[in-house]
Image (cartoon, helix red, strand yellow):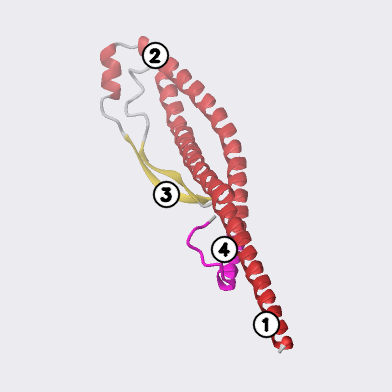
């Protein structure tokens, strides 16, 4: 029960309004939590598939690059890749997902992924670099989804705590206090009626 509350009708009306507001807030937060959970589970499934695909593609690209490197002299590989000619800048924006601000990555690209001529390099090197160029887009997309999962999980936990605070603390306290004030007011009303009846009896006896 909320302490320090005067058992008056005015206070009773205030507490009933607070209880109504708390009940509406509780329902909205529960709906938000449930919807966030649904979205989170969908994204988690998507992230699992993307992560497996990204890891598989990266290992395949790395394997191809190692094979191509083995067919070339070490100085040829170093010379070919010494001066990169492609530049990628990543900018981070924000988008709203159920009141959660999740990142949205976008990239600006300039130059070519292949910084060398084709005379002294193997074809596998060209293919592995071109595949890595396309791979970067998938990597950014995966990073965006994984960060969204992290932020949504944090928001769900915070929402869950707020729901529990309303459900197990504030609402029961308000209900108990309302019950207490209602009981006191009814008791005062009965006492007033009894006093009034006694006054009437005294008046009649005179």
- At a point 54% along the width and 49% down the height, the residue shown is 169
Distance from Cα at disc 3 to Cα at disc 4: 38 Å
Q: Nearer the viewer, mark 1 or mark 3?
A: 1
Tell me, for residue 18, which label it has, or none. Answer: 4
Give the residue number, with chain letter if any, for mark 3: 93
Please, which residue is most extreme toward the front here? 206
Residue 116 percent across, percent down from the top left? 32, 26
Q: Is residue 19 magenta?
A: yes
Give the residue number, with chain letter if any, for mark 2: 66
Q: Residues within 10 Å of mark 1 (few under 14, many from 20)?
A: few
Which quarter of the rendering shows the N terminus? Answer: bottom right
- Of mark 3 and mark 4, the one earlier in the sequence is 4
Q: In terms of image quadrants, where is residue 182?
A: bottom right
- Of mark 4 and mark 2, the one earlier in the sequence is 4
Residue 10 percent across, percent down from the top left? 57, 73
Q: Nearer the viewer, mark 1 or mark 4?
A: 1
- Location of residue 96 with respect to 39 vertically, above or below: below
Residue 68 percent across, percent down from the top left? 39, 14
- Of mark 1 and mark 4, the one earlier in the sequence is 4
Q: State the extent of the magenta-drawn residues as a range.
A: 2-22
Distance from Cα at disc 1 to Cα at disc 4: 39 Å
Distance from Cα at disc 4 to Cα at disc 2: 68 Å
SS type, badge 4? helix
Q: Are marks 3 and 2 in contact (CB under 8 Å)?
A: no
Which quarter of the rendering shows the C terminus? Answer: bottom right
- Of mark 2 and mark 1, the one earlier in the sequence is 2
- Location of residue 60 with respect to 34 vertically, above or below: above
Q: Is residue 150 magenta?
A: no
Give the residue number, with chain letter if any, for mark 1: 199
């Amino acid at each position: 029960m909320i302490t320090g509350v005067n058992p008056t009708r005015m206070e009773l009306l205030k507490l009933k309004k607070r209880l109504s507001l708390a009940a509406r807030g509780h329902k909205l937060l529960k709906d938000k939590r449930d919807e966030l959970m649904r979205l989170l589970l969908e994204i988690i499934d998507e992230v699992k598939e993307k992560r497996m695909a990204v890891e598989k593609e990266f290992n395949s690209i790395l394997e191809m690059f190692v094979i191509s490197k083995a067919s070339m002299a070490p100085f040829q590989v170093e010379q070919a890749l010494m001066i990169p000619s492609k530049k990628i800048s990543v900018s981070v924006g924000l988008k709203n997902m159920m009141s959660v601000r999740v990142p949205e990555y976008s990239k600006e690209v300039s130059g070519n992924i292949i910084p060398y001529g084709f005379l002294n390099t193997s074809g596998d090197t060209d293919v592995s670099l071109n595949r890595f160029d396309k791979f970067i887009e998938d990597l950014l997309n995966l990073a965006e989804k994984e960060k969204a999962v992290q932020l949504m999980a944090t928001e769900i936990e915070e929402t869950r705590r707020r729901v529990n605070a309303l459900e197990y603390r504030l609402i029961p306290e308000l209900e108990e206090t309302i019950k207490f004030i209602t009981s006191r007011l009814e008791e005062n009303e009965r006492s007033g009626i009894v006093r009034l009846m006694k006054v009437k009896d005294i008046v009649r006896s005179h």
